Amino acid sequence: MDLPGGEDNLFDYVVVGGGSAGCVLAARLSQDPTLRVALLEAGGADTSVLIHCPAGLALMAKSKLDINWRFQTEPQPGLAGRRGYQPRGKVLGGSSSVNAMVYIRGQRQDYDAWAAAGNPGWSYDEVLPYFKRAEHNERGADAFHGSGGPLNVMDLRSPNRYSEVFVQAAVQAGLARNPDFNGAQQEGAGMYQVTHRNGERCSAAKAYLSPALGRPNLRVFTGSKATRILTDGRRACGVSFLQDGVERQVRARREVLLSAGAIQSPQLLMLSGIGPGAELQHHGIGVVHDLPGVGQALHDHPDVVQVMDAPRLKDFFGLSFSGAWRAVGAIRQWRQSRSGPLTTNFAEAGAFLRSSPAQPRPDLQLHFVIAKLLDHGRKTVLGHGYSCHVCLLDPASRGSISLASADPLAAPRIDPNFLGDPGDLQRLVEGFKRMREIIGQPALAALGARELAASAAARDDAAIAAFIRSHADTIYHPVGSCRMGPGSADVVDAELRVHGMQGLRVVDASVMPQIVAGNTNAPTIMIAEKAVDLLRSAAVMA
Ligand SMILES: Cc1cc2nc3c(=O)[nH]c(=O)nc-3n(C[C@H](O)[C@H](O)[C@H](O)COP(=O)(O)OP(=O)(O)OC[C@H]3O[C@@H](n4cnc5c(N)ncnc54)[C@H](O)[C@@H]3O)c2cc1C
């Protein structure tokens, strides 16, 4: 297929989406000066201080900054008919520029299950080197951790004193203290390590892309929304995108790499004629390749929050007269020394535990948050207090991404089907009770905080289930919508190549065959690091 434009719009690789995965791809591939790499990102540059100052996280949900897609889900029958919220980064760094910076990889069994599902090369022992390659852990290297990688991982500089109180309460409830959730054992309670460097957020853009920006062989197009993958028969040969309202195209000599995330990678495939044939025809889109699995198998960690009111404990973040006064000092401290309260990621401590002793491995995660959190931080809450999240790590429910229309500027239909499987609700009820038990232990009880009325009234299993249905939502980890696997319902193979297509891979969180037991940023970066090796060996073979 002939595309307009000369050498200037011809690249070896075109990466779509400058998020956690896309930044890794663009930076690593452009290390080879003989390759020309283009990165298309719908959002802009990551210039806002709210991104770089960790505590800016608290203001992002409410800010008017155009750095978040702010998607909504379809009404969820499992959530009492409510629509869920799906924030996603729309800026260089993608969701790693707006996330809570918790550094977690998941469990050995997650990756072993990926490999056992027909994905050679993805067992824990095989992916561990990529986690280590990505990482610079300030604690130093060991059997599980890397040193010298682009992604800075560290202990919080100025942890809130109550985070340690949470860990003590969890230990009082019978959990082991765990100093490293990414080491030999994940189970237990402890402080999270965070993706920070020098008291600032270390997003994938900061870690990977910024140091590569001066390379003459890397071209980053911001404000550039990909609208269609251009194909020549079943071969991807470029990408059409909108920049400042003008349609432009880039051509890919070798491959198009789709890294638009779990919501938009399947959407873009479908807009390009790659997906469930009948659905594409329904929207008047010509079918390039009937691939039924595109957009299916979406899943996410369902999560519910217990909020505690502690008006006199001013060391918790909160809106009050004295809180405002302290904020002035905190801003000064962060400006001067990149330390102090503004280095918080809010979800400072947590735990991994089992919903019942019969569970073979932890299936619940807690995030202890040093502020009162309502409605994803979109609701303004007065006063001080804390919150604790519990989420289910291995949900059985599966949902989907589908097209709402053929308009590339329209959001897709997002249906995570939260709690669609009754077993998910049951285990989340158990999780809620375990969380409450921890909050009731002497260490935390001594703070004298009061549970907010909405959950306080839920005392038996039926009432807790009703509370969960009326309050649960995502903890922002959608995956699986371009599932990796060998079957006819899968989208990419174990080398992340789209089944039935040439010159086209998906490299982002959407390829996870089964969600990992933990936060998804580090696993997505690992996937991209491994993809770089797969691309390099494919180029050698070609
Ligand atoms: C609020 C929030 C909190 C989170 N907290 C944590 C946490 O503490 N720890 C953790 O490990 N994980 C966390 N996560 C999850 C984690 O950040 C994501 O799983 C991860 O960043 C996903 O990476 P990705 O590359 O798949 O997608 P993204 O990072 O979302 O990147 C996709 C990129 O593609 C761009 N894009 C989309 N469509 C197009 C298009 N058509 N054309 C051009 N560009 C396009 C987007 O703008 C975006 O920049 C959180 C996520 C959110 C939203």
Image: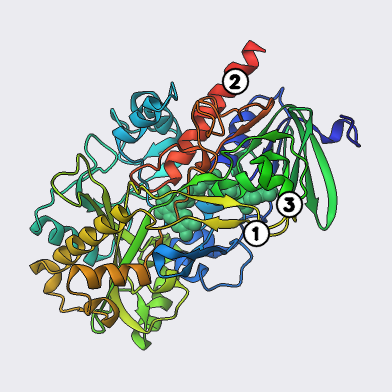
Q: Secondary structure at mark 2?
A: helix
Badge nearest the viewer, 3 or 2: 3
What is the C-alpha distance between the residues marked 3 and 2? 37 Å
Say whether marks 1 and 3 touch (CB < 8 Å). Answer: no
The residue beneath circle 1 is 411
Three-letter code, disc 1: Ala
Whether residue 150 is situated above or below residue 60 in the rendered picture? above
Whether residue 482 is situated above or below residue 124 in the rendered picture? below
Judged from this view, the residue extending furthest toward the top is 541
Residue 19: give x, y in percent of width and height: 57, 47
Badge nearest the viewer, 1 or 3: 3
Q: Secondary structure at mark 1?
A: loop
The residue beneath circle 2 is 536
Three-letter code, disc 2: Arg
Q: Which mark is residue 283?
A: 3
Badge nearest the viewer, 1 or 2: 1
Quadrant for residue 259, please give it.
Answer: top right
Horizontal side of residue 236 vs 143, given as left or right: right
Quadrant of the image for the C terminus?
top right
Judged from this view, the residue extending furthest toward the bottom is 321
Decide if ligand 1 comes within 8 Å of the CB at mark 3.
Answer: no
Three-letter code, disc 3: His
Whether residue 339 is situated above or below residue 113 in the rendered picture? below
Residue 225: give x, y in percent of width and height: 73, 51
Q: Residues within 10 Å of mark 2 (few under 14, many from 20)?
A: few
Quadrant of the image for the N terminus?
top right
Residue 72: give x, y in percent of width and height: 55, 64
